[in-house]
Image (tube, helix red, strand yellow):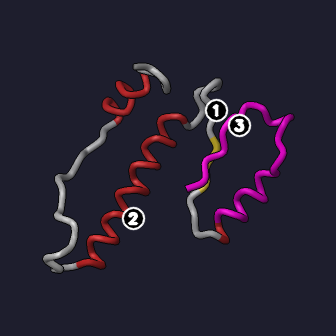
Amino acid sequence: MLVGNKADLRHLRDVPMGESIGFAERENTFFMEKSALEVLNVENTFTEVLTQIYRVVSRKALDIGDDTTSVPRGQTINIGKDDVSAIMKGGCCSS
């Protein structure tokens, strides 16, 4: 996953958006931009990261199949919008 940060600083952009999108497509990677200042895609980015991780882990679990030497299966964790909002209220660097 490729996440462009500081999307609010368009005038200071070093990499054109089309180039970022092209790179993500060539690498078969999800791309999105976010801005914490403008609260643009902050929750969506967090949710999408979790979704992409879940997809990768699920795909690997399917590839492993019934191999008894594989990593044991864990519990499903459902992340809802309220859960994401509660986490985001703490800020990125809160203790």
Disc sitting over residue 57 in the figure? none
Measure the C-alpha gap from mark 3 to mark 1. Answer: 5 Å
Position above or below: 27 against 45? below
> Mark 3 belongs to which amino acid?
Ala
Which residues, given as a range, are shown in magenta? 1-24
Residue 16, percent from left and from top: 82, 51
Measure the C-alpha gap from mark 2 to mark 1. Answer: 26 Å
Q: Nearer the viewer, residue 70 or 86?
A: 70
Q: Is residue 80 magenta?
A: no
Do the residues under discs 2 and 1 have CB atoms within 8 angstroms?
no
Position above or below: 66 against 55? below
Q: Is residue 8 magenta?
A: yes
Residue 29, percent from left and from top: 57, 63
Measure the C-alpha gap from mark 3 to mark 2. Answer: 27 Å
Q: Characterize the local packing of mark 3: few (<14), some (14-19) or many (20 or more) Cα atoms within 10 angstroms.
A: many
Do the residues under discs 3 and 1 have CB atoms within 8 angstroms?
yes
Mark 3 vs mark 1: which is more N-terminal? 3
Position above or below: 41 against 38? below
Say which residue label 1 marks: 35
Say which residue label 3 marks: 7
Say which residue label 2 marks: 56
Residue 22, percent from left and from top: 72, 64
Residue located 43% across and 26% down the image: 88
Residue located 58% across and 69% down the image: 28
Kindly state the secondary structure of the residue where label 3 is placed: loop
> Mark 1 belongs to which amino acid?
Ser
> Mark 2 belongs to which amino acid?
Val
54 on left or right of 41: left
Kindly state the secondary structure of the residue where label 1 is placed: loop
70 on left or right of 33: left
Kindly state the secondary structure of the residue where label 2 is placed: helix
In which quadrant is the C terminus drawn?
top left
